[in-house]
Amino acid sequence: MSFNSKSTGWTRTQSIGVAVVDNDQRVHRMFEQIFKKTNTFHCSGIFSTGGAALDSLTKVKVNLLLVEMGLSDICGIECAIRLLASHPEMRTIVSTSLRDPAFIHHAVTAGIDHCLIRPLRYDQCLASMRFVSCKACAAKNSRGPKFSPAGVAKKPNGLGRNASIDSREELVLKFLADGLLYKEIADRMGVSNAVLKKLQHRIFLKLNAQNRTQAVNHWCYFQNADV
């Protein structure tokens, strides 16, 4: 499946232009391989610093941005926010080594679409790129907003502290936040797809979530809010 982000939005016609901003040269080489091996995505630019990306990408078509949180010259979230000013239809993924719900909460409320936990893997990045791209197309087709921070900034409706998440459900949520596919999660937990679906169903009910993104967002809220 492929998409294209024109001034009118995302359509299923051409490949997705991806920009990568990351300090690690190994990550650069990994994305070069992704661009060579898939027709879904093409390279809009690979940069080591936020400043270089901001200088080069202002007038370049970018559908999807993958940016490292700990850039040497600027915060990755700040880099994404600045680029969104000139690319309002752009989707954003931030990578970080912090397994901290507070960071995910901060990123999502800033308008970031997805977070990845480092070290980055080929399959992990490709799965997350496809997930975010499909979400973009679905949102455009439904004429919904790109992202509504209200779902995280305030208490999600119908929830309270009694909607507790047990250890297995929390593990599923952490894997979802890492961008893993459901099959990968089932394999890592050593459970069947049927068991994972039951866990997912319980999580969605407890967190009043309609999809995996809402589930992670609501979970992050309760990890940080005093309700």
Image: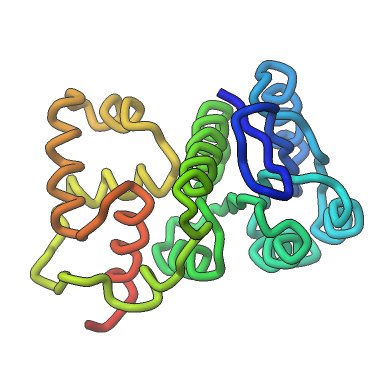
Q: In the image, what residue occupies the spot 16% across and 70% down?
A: 158
Judged left or right of residue 189, residue 66 is right
Q: In the image, what residue occupies the spot 53% across and 57% down?
A: 146
Q: Position of residue 79 (x, y in %)?
A: 73, 63
Q: Is residue 85 above or below residue 34?
A: below
Residue closest to the far bottom = 226
Quarter of the N terminus within the rendering: top right
Judged left or right of residue 158, residue 99 is right
Q: In the image, what residue occupies the spot 20% across and 42% down?
A: 200
Quarter of the C terminus within the rendering: bottom left
Q: Pick the residue in front: 112 or 166.
A: 112
Q: In the image, what residue occupies the spot 50% across and 60% down?
A: 145
Res. 58 image quadrant = bottom right
Q: Is residue 200 above or below residue 222?
A: above
Q: Pick the residue in front: 38 or 168.
A: 38
Q: Position of residue 69 (x, y in %)?
A: 64, 58
